């Protein structure tokens, strides 16, 4: 989750859309997305350069998961340009559409994913698909991991981002370590550290030591000593 300061156009050329400016880009956001959040007006800082002319601006701060934003980036010519990340997430949302060739199963959930992308993003499956094992040709894989962690893992494959909460940080970290996904593991570790409290530090230290997460154990020890 992240807090973003954005300048919204009071009126957009897109019906039911707001435009906002952030980091030098202009985005279009579906207005229905904003209804799920408490919108708090904040003033535009003095000296802010707004790269739009003759626009009535409303400025807000929102806290949300960037992956949930239905956005697009208009090009200089006025036509909407697409991004790789946006296209991949759209591809994931369209499943099953006949293009996926692998199904990941976690509890009641079934995720139709693409073997090439799974191989490129996850070292465990890359090694498996390149091996002579019978599973290398399988089209369905039952995952023993927590279904919530699998959901985060699948979205990470297509977006390179993960919204990890305190209640699933341990499960995501374990899954990322098992499937050899270094960046997701790092994000999981960061979420574990961010969730530390006097009530869970003892259990997390035991867990990290038992799993052999030496770098995480060092961070947990430092938290206790601070």
Image (cartoon, rainbow, N blue to C red):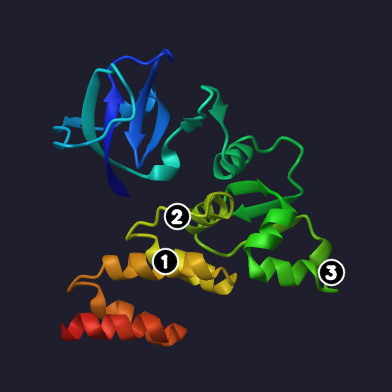
At x 37%, y 39%, the residue is 24
Position of 219 relative to 155 (above/below): below
CB under 8 Å between callouts 1 and 3? no
Question: Camera-side residue: 110 or 119?
Answer: 119
Front in this rendered view, residue 91 or 213:
91
**Where residue 28 sits in the image (x, y, percent)?**
42, 27
Q: Secondary structure at mark 3?
A: helix
Say how many tags the image has: 3
Q: Secondary structure at mark 1?
A: helix
Q: Earlier in the sequence, mark 1 or mark 3?
A: 3
Can you say which quadrant of the picture contains the C terminus? bottom left
In the rendered image, residue 141, in percent from the top left (x then y), is placed at 70, 59
Compare marks 2 and 1 and give the one earlier in the sequence: 2
Read off the residue under disc 3: 134
Q: Residue at x 57, y 41 (%)?
A: 89
Q: Residues within 10 Å of mark 3 (few under 14, many from 20)?
A: few
- Horizontal side, residue 87 vs residue 21: left or right: right
Quadrant of the image occupied by residue 17: top left
Q: Which residue is mark 2?
A: 162
Read off the residue under disc 1: 188
Tell me which numbered mark, 2 or 3, is placed earlier along the sequence: 3
Asked whether residue 85 is in view, the answer is yes
For residue 127, side relative to residue 146 (left or right):
right
Tell me if label 2 and label 1 are in contact, CB under 8 Å: yes
Of 185 and 26, the residue lying toward us: 26
Observer able to see residue 206: no
Tell me how far mark 1 sits from mark 3, CA to CA: 31 Å
């Amino acid at each position: 989750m992240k807090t973003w300061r954005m300048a919204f156009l009071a009126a957009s050329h897109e019906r039911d859309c707001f435009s906002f400016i952030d980091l030098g880009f202009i985005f279009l956001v579906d207005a229905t997305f904003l209804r799920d959040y408490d919108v708090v007006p904040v003033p535009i800082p003095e000296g802010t350069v707004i790269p739009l002319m003759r626009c009535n601006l409303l400025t807000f701060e929102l806290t949300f998961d960037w992956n949930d934003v239905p956005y697009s980036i208009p090009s200089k010519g006025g036509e909407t340009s697409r991004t790789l990340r946006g296209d991949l997430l759209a591809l994931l949302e369209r499943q099953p559409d006949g293009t996926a060739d692998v199904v990941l199963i976690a509890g009641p959930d079934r995720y139709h994913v693409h073997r090439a992308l799974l191989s490129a993003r996850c070292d465990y499956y890359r090694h498996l698909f390149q091996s002579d094992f019978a599973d290398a040709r399988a089209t369905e894989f039952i995952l023993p991991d927590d279904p919530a962690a699998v959901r985060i893992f699948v979205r990470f494959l297509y977006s390179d981002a993960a919204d990890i909460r305190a209640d699933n940080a341990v499960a995501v970290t374990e899954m990322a370590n098992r499937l050899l996904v270094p960046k997701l593991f790092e994000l999981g570790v960061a979420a574990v550290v961010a969730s530390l409290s006097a009530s869970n530090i003892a259990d997390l230290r035991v867990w990290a030591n038992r799993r052999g997460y030496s770098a995480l154990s060092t961070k947990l020890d430092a938290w206790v000593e601070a």
